[in-house]
Amino acid sequence: MQLLGMAWIAETFGIVPLFVFAACLTSVTVVIGLLSYKVFHRAEETGQESASTL
């Protein structure tokens, strides 16, 4: 389904806007991944500290 959507964007707007759109989506995904990594990394450290006090 995503392939059809990307093909439609390429046919309607051109290949350059398609690549710009894909780059924006990739950038958003990287930012979300980095933020999620920090949250999960902190949760892991907190879990290890509480486990060591038991």
Image (cartoon, rainbow, N blue to C red):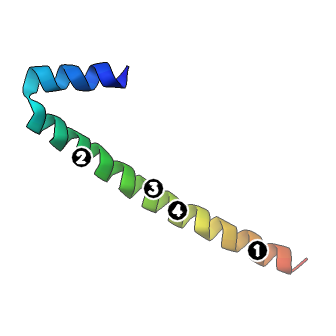
The disc labelled 2 sits on which kind of residue? Cys
Q: CA distance from mark 3 to mark 2?
A: 14 Å
Q: Which residue is mark 4?
A: 37
Q: CA distance from mark 1 to mark 4?
A: 16 Å
> Could you tell me which residue is drawn at 45 percent across and 56 percent down?
33
Query: Where in the figure is residue 6, as x and y percent of width and height?
Result: 25, 26
The disc labelled 3 sits on which kind of residue? Gly
Q: Which residue is mark 3?
A: 33
Quadrant of the drawing holding the C terminus: bottom right
Q: Secondary structure at mark 3?
A: helix
> Could you tell me which residue is drawn at 11 percent across and 33 percent down?
15
The disc labelled 1 sits on which kind of residue? Gln
Q: Verify CB contact (< 8 Å) between mark 3 and mark 4.
A: yes
The disc labelled 4 sits on which kind of residue? Tyr
- Tell me: residue 49, above or below residue 5: below
Earlier in the chain: of badge 2 and badge 4, it is 2
Earlier in the chain: of badge 3 and badge 2, it is 2
Q: Which residue is mark 1?
A: 48
Query: Where in the figure is residue 49, as x and y percent of width and height?
Result: 76, 78
The local crowd at label 3, few if under 14, some if 14 to 19, many if 20 or more residues have their Cα within 10 Å, is: few
Q: CA distance from mark 3 to mark 4?
A: 6 Å
Residue 24's disc number: 2
